[in-house]
Amino acid sequence: MPTSDPARSSAVRSRRRVVVRAGLRIGTIGAVTAAASSIVFAVVAKPPLHGFFDLRVYRGAVLWWLQGEPLYSFALPPGMKGFTYPPFAAALLVPLTWLPERPTEILVLLASVGVVVLVTWSTVAPVARRHAVSPWFAVALAVPVVLALEPIRLTLGEGQLNMFILALVLADVVAWRRGRAWCGVGIGLATACKLTPGLFIVFLALIGRGRAAALATGTGLGATLLGFAVDPGASWLYWTSTLWDTSRVGRLGNPWNQSLLGLLAHVSSPGRPDRLLWALLAVGFAVLGLGRAVRVYRRGDDLAAVTLAGLTACLVSPISWVHHLYWVVPALVVLADVAAGTPVLGTASAWSRDRSRVLAAGAGLLAVAVAVPFLLSTYWAFEPAAGVPTSLPVDVLGRSVYTCAMSALVVLLPARDLTGRRARRPVGGGPGPAARSGERSPARSRPDGWSPR
């Protein structure tokens, strides 16, 4: 009877495990692709749900502009919506005119879905590894949920370019974590296209990234000057008139406007919101949100810090449409991580074990409370019929539920202990004392909540 070779048996078992793992990964990718495709087709691409209206505005305005017509005189029915971004953004969107309308819509949709999957992988995979869960399995569960959230659904269905703005900001997160010299370029370009990301320049300055803040500012100004070089008249019109005309974007009381000013507009409808009250609220939330973002960053949680800055930008902007609120996605990832057991900074005390359990349960409940309205679009149920009076609780908690959810996240989003030690990060984000003495910094030796890998 032949004697079995232990080494050969071990090699066979090892090869089998590799084959099984590869099969599971391929199956997972297939499942994610199938689920994502089903959601995109059923919820987004199937007409006439959204019809890529915003993308049609971009493409139509750029075609109009290339024919020699004034950029901001273009209007697309119904609603007669026109182009609302600087001429530099119009120049970047010229490739949208290279193909017919339908192929352009399909390519933009596929590219946006690709960015959604990439960002989901980058945020969810490190959390899965930390809790000994297969990243492929976790991402397979997360991608359909992310696609089902209304900000992402609307971004895809309207043909919005929000995911590419998000990608530019997160590219700078990768850059500052890796010490790249070009950190700030992404935020500068995003700001030149859409002013709201400009708050991240302030955030960079506050965390001691002066060089990155200066590079972002210079990039934004350079791109704006390039817009003046391309079309001086349109640039002058935009920065002196069009930018300040909110009626071009839409009415403040629109249910899709979920900023602080939108909340006040919902409460005061059909009257006008109190601009002084809005200014006070905006300044207060800017100080609170950026202050928390800086503290969280210095404690080592980059993802939570950037998310707080993004949520703050959505709240203080005069108009934040629902498809702008994509920062709720990384916020849910942070809450899910804490709910799964990742400790929160500041819980090291004699009763930390019980407190950690309470915090984990609270994070889970907050994640559910935030996710459910964004999945079900509950605010539409509180939109009153014409002439029907409403109450303050309905206007605030019902019609402005996303504003309330983001405000709660700005106040309550935790800073996770991702290093095992409660060491503060120095101003400027440089290495701590251990790294300067030659020891590997714990902040670099363990994965945090956002990874470019």
Image (tube, grey):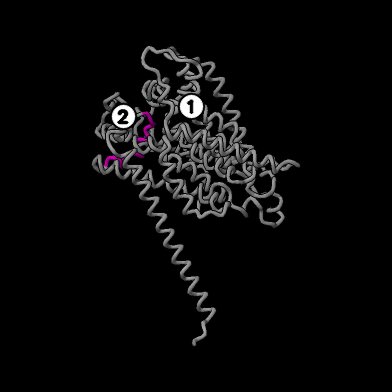
Main secondary structure found in the magenta portion: helix
> What's the residue type where badge 1 is placed?
Val
On screen, residue 322 above or below 115:
above
* Magenta-colored stretch includes residue 131: no
Q: Measured along the vertical axis of the image, is residue 6 above or below residue 218?
A: below
Residue 209 in percent (x, y) is at 59, 41
Residue that lies at the very extreme toward the front in this rendered image: 1
Horizontal side of 222 relative to 303 (left or right) equals left
Instruction: Report whether 66 appears left or right of 18.
Output: left
- Depth check, front residue: 273 or 207: 273
Circles 2 and 1, Cβ within 8 Å, touching? The answer is: no
Q: Which residues are magenta?
A: 84-97
- The secondary element bearing badge 1 is classed as helix
Residue 26's image quarter? bottom left
Q: Tag count in the figure?
A: 2
Residue 385's place in the image compared with 303, above or below, is above
Say above or below: 300 vs 400.
below
What is the x, y in percent for residue 194?
43, 33
Left or right position of 334 against 253: right
The residue that disc 1 covers is 401
Identify the residue shown where x is 48% and y is 43%.
185
Q: State the CA–CA distance, disc 2 to disc 1.
A: 36 Å
Residue type at mark 2 is Leu
User: Judging from the image, what secondary structure is the residue with disc 2 in?
Assistant: helix
Residue 91 is a magenta residue: yes
Residue at the image position 49 percent from the left and 44 percent from the top: 170
Residue 219, image x, y percentages = 47, 39
The numbered mark at residue 71 is: 2
- Report which quarter residue 324 is drawn in: top left
Q: Residues within 10 Å of mark 2 (few under 14, many from 20)?
A: many
